[in-house]
Image (cartoon, grey):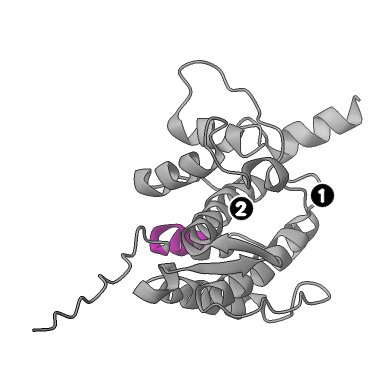
């Protein structure tokens, strides 16, 4: 008698949906005039940040399908208000497929376990969502499960070789800070950043 063993399907470990939907809502707060404003990422204006989001949502969508990352465009596409929500929805759907979590994929040309790629994708949605909210003067909240996934990726004690090269220096936050502020600090952001504070610091530097 021959017994055939069927491997259990790879589980979907977490959902990118809450972070993606939060980011879509934040897009409504971006005015055309505000595209040139600063963000907590010193190298990005709001326009640059949105262009980065267009590229990364397409790239992590392809990573879920184990396909090569598409080349980055020359800047922010004119249809970004329609394109970004579509790409965010497609990204969420791609990582809801069980086979997306199996094996390895590549991000930025670097091979990674598929689950780590999904962690990095969620990290990008959460931290850049926070960046966009701060840059446009909008409130930002984040669901606890998403924050826990991002914390596991960013925590200095995490045994993750991607931590050092991908993310900036940790910003220390005061004792008693919220979990969100702690995660933001681990992502190299000052939780107290605001466009006004940034302009004041630049003027009096």
Q: Look at mark 1 in the image and give the residue it sits on.
A: 43
Residue 132: horizontal and vertical position, in percent? 62, 53
Q: Residues within 10 Å of mark 2 (few under 14, many from 20)?
A: many
Q: CA distance from mark 2 to mark 1?
A: 13 Å
Residue 57 in view: yes
Q: Is residue 63 above or below residue 149?
A: below
Residue lying furthest left? 1
Name the residue: 82% across, 36% down: 199
Residue 190: horizontal and vertical position, in percent? 66, 32
- The kind of secondary structure the magenta stretch mainly shows is helix
Residue 51: horizontal and vertical position, in percent? 72, 67
Residue 90 is marked as none
Nearer to us in this view, 58 or 28: 58
Q: Is residue 70 magenta?
A: no
Q: Look at mark 2 in the image and give the residue it sits on.
A: 128
Q: Which residues are magenta?
A: 17-23
Nearer to us in this view, 171 or 203: 171
How many marks the image carries: the answer is 2
Image quarter of residue 171: top right
Q: Secondary structure at mark 1?
A: loop
Residue 14: horizontal and vertical position, in percent? 36, 58
């Amino acid at each position: 008698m021959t017994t055939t063993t069927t491997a259990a399907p790879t589980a979907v470990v977490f959902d990118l949906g809450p972070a993606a939907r939060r980011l879509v809502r934040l897009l409504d707060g971006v005015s055309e005039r505000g595209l040139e404003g600063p963000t907590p990422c010193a190298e990005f204006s709001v326009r640059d940040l949105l262009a980065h989001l267009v590229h990364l949502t397409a790239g992590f969508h392809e990573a879920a399908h184990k396909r090569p990352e598409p080349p980055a465009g020359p800047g922010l596409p004119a249809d970004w208000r329609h394109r970004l929500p579509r790409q965010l929805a497609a990204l969420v759907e791609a990582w809801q497929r069980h086979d997306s979590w199996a094996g390895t994929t590549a991000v930025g040309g670097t091979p990674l376990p598929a689950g780590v790629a999904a962690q990095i994708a969620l990290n990008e949605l959460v931290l850049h969502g926070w960046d966009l909210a701060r840059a446009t003067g909008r409130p930002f909240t984040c669901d606890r499960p998403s924050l826990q996934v991002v914390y596991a990726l960013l925590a200095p004690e995490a045994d993750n070789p991607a931590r050092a090269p991908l993310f900036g220096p940790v910003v220390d936050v005061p004792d008693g800070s919220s979990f969100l502020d702690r995660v933001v600090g681990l992502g190299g952001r000052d939780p107290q950043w605001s466009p006004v504070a940034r302009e004041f610091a630049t003027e009096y530097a």
